[in-house]
Image (spheres, helix red, strand yellow):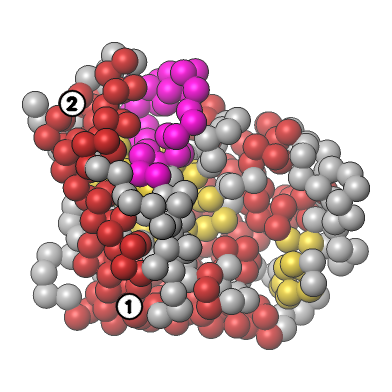
C-alpha cells in the first residue's frame, strides 16, 4: 500500500455530481455551500431546468475557443459564428460564477478548502455536438481532435474566473463521460438512427482525455477525475490519461471492476464512490449504515485496509436534477453522514 493511499491526513469527504433542481442559482449555491462545508467538496451547480444553454452540452460548449455552436431540432450544432443560443449559455454560466462569488463573499464560517466544477468530457461532447450536415461530430476524426483542443484552450479562462470567485480554494475538476462505453463499443446512433457510428479506438480516447487533463492541470486544478457509468467503464484508460481519480456508481460494479479500483487506490489514486442511490427521487433515502456498508463490504473483501478509506469521496449514484430542492438537500446531508460513518471506520 502506497503512502498516498494510507495518508492519515486524508479523510472521506462528500460531494455531488453537479446537476441540481430548480432554476435559482442563488438558492442552489447557498444550499450546496451550506451542506458541503469544510472538509467536504462544494460545487458549481448545473441547473438544466433553466432550459437551453443550461444543459451539460451547451454549458461546456460555451467554453470552446474558436468554435461556435447553436441549437437545431436535433441538438447542438457547430456553426461558423456565435448566435443567441451560445450567448445565452455563456450568460448563464457567467451568472452562476458571479452568484458563487457573492455567496462565498457573504460567508462568515470556515470556507471549504476545495471547490469543484464539472465539464462534459471531449468524447461525450463530440457525441452531443453535430456537424453542419447534421451528423454527430463523433463521426469525424478531425472534429474529435478539434473539439478536444478547443475545450483544452478554453478551460484556463474558466478556471481563472471560478478561482477568483472562491479565493484560496483548491480547484477540483470533474470530466463527465456518460457516453464513453457506447463511444468505445460503436453503439452511438447516427443522426438518422438507422446505423451506428464506428467505435473510437481506445488509444485515441486516452490521448484526447490527456489533451484536456493536461490543460486543466496547467490551469491550476489540483485534482482531476473522470466520471463514467459503471457499465464497461474504462478505468485503465482513465488512469493512463493522467487523471487523479475515477468517479463511478457502485450499484452494478463487477468483481473485476472492484479489483481495478483497488489497484487504483494502491497506486495512490482517488475513488469517488457513487454509494448513495438516487434513481428514484420519490423513494426514501437509504439509511446511513446501509450506505456505509455499500462501501465497507467490498472494500474489506478486497483486503484493503480501513485506514485507506480516506482516499474516497462519497457521491450520489447520479445527478439530482429530478429531485426537489428539499430532497436534493437531504441527499447532501445523508452523504456527509455517510462520510462521517466511514471516517469512524478509518480511524478505528
Q: Position of residue 129 (x, y in %)?
A: 73, 61
Q: Nearer the viewer, residue 115 or 24?
A: 24
Q: Nearer the viewer, residue 343 or 324?
A: 324
Residue at image location 27% in from the left, 30% down from the top: 293
Crowding at dot 1, Cα within 10 Å, few <14 / some 14-19 / many 20+, comes out as few
Residue indicated by mark 1: 27
Q: Earlier in the sequence, mark 1 or mark 2?
A: 1
Element at label 1: helix
Q: How many marks?
A: 2
Q: Residue 97 lies in what quarter of the image?
A: bottom left
Residue at image location 67% in from the left, 80% down from the top: 85
| Residue reaching furthest to the front | 283
Crowding at dot 2, Cα within 10 Å, few <14 / some 14-19 / many 20+, comes out as many
Q: Position of residue 323 (x, y in %)?
A: 42, 63
Q: Position of residue 284 (x, y in %)?
A: 33, 51
Residue at image location 16% in from the left, 38% down from the top: 341
Element at label 2: helix
Residue at image location 49% in from the left, 44% down from the top: 227
Q: What residue range appears in magenta? A: 248-277
| Marks 1, 2: nearer the viewer | 1
Q: Is residue 159 left or right of residue 141?
A: left
Task: Tell me, for residue 62, which label it has, or none.
Answer: none
Q: CA distance from mark 1 to mark 2?
A: 36 Å
Q: Is residue 256 magenta?
A: yes
Query: Could you tell me which quadrant the C terminus lies in?
Result: top left
Q: Is residue 280 left or right of residue 297?
A: right
Q: Is residue 79 magenta?
A: no
Residue indicated by mark 2: 307
Q: Is residue 3 left or right of residue 269?
A: left
Q: Is residue 237 visible?
A: no
Q: Residue 210 lies in what quarter of the image?
A: top right
Amino acid at each position: 500500500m502506497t503512502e498516498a493511499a494510507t495518508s492519515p491526513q486524508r479523510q472521506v469527504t462528500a460531494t455531488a455530481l453537479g446537476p441540481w433542481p430548480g432554476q435559482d442559482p442563488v438558492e442552489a449555491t447557498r444550499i450546496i455551500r451550506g451542506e458541503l462545508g469544510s472538509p467536504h467538496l462544494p460545487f458549481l451547480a448545473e441547473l438544466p431546468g433553466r432550459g437551453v444553454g443550461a444543459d451539460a452540452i451547451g454549458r461546456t460548449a460555451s467554453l470552446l475557443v474558436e468554435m461556435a455552436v447553436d441549437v437545431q431540432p436535433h441538438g447542438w450544432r457547430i456553426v461558423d459564428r456565435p448566435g443567441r443560443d451560445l450567448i445565452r449559455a455563456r450568460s448563464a454560466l457567467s451568472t452562476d460564477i458571479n452568484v458563487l462569488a457573492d455567496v462565498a463573499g457573504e460567508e462568515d464560517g470556515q470556507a471549504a478548502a476545495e471547490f469543484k466544477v464539472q465539464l462534459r468530457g471531449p468524447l461525450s461532447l463530440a457525441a452531443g455536438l453535430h456537424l453542419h450536415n447534421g451528423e454527430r461530430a463523433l463521426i469525424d476524426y478531425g472534429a474529435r481532435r478539434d473539439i478536444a483542443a478547443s475545450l483544452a484552450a478554453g478551460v484556463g479562462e474558466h478556471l481563472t474566473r471560478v478561482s477568483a470567485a472562491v479565493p484560496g480554494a483548491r480547484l477540483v475538476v470533474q470530466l463527465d463521460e456518460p457516453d464513453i462505453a457506447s463511444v468505445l463499443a460503436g453503439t452511438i446512433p447516427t443522426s438518422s438512427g438507422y446505423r451506428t457510428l464506428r467505435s473510437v479506438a481506445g488509444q485515441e480516447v486516452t490521448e484526447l482525455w490527456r489533451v484536456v487533463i493536461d490543460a486543466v492541470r496547467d490551469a491550476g486544478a489540483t485534482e482531476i477525475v473522470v466520471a463514467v457509468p459503471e457499465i464497461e467503464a474504462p478505468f485503465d484508460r482513465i488512469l493512463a490519461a493522467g487523471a487523479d481519480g475515477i468517479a463511478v456508481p457502485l450499484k452494478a460494479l463487477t468483481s473485476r471492476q472492484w479489483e481495478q479500483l483497488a489497484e487504483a487506490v494502491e497506486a495512490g489514486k482517488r475513488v469517488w464512490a457513487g454509494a448513495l442511490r438516487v434513481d428514484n427521487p420519490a423513494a426514501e433515502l437509504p439509511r446511513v449504515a446501509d450506505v456505509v456498508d455499500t462501501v465497507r463490504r467490498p472494500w474489506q473483501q478486497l483486503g484493503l485496509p480501513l485506514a485507506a478509506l480516506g482516499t474516497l469521496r462519497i457521491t450520489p449514484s447520479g445527478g439530482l436534477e429530478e429531485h426537489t430542492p428539499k430532497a436534493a438537500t437531504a441527499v447532501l446531508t445523508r452523504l456527509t453522514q455517510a462520510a462521517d460513518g466511514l471516517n469512524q471506520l478509518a480511524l478505528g
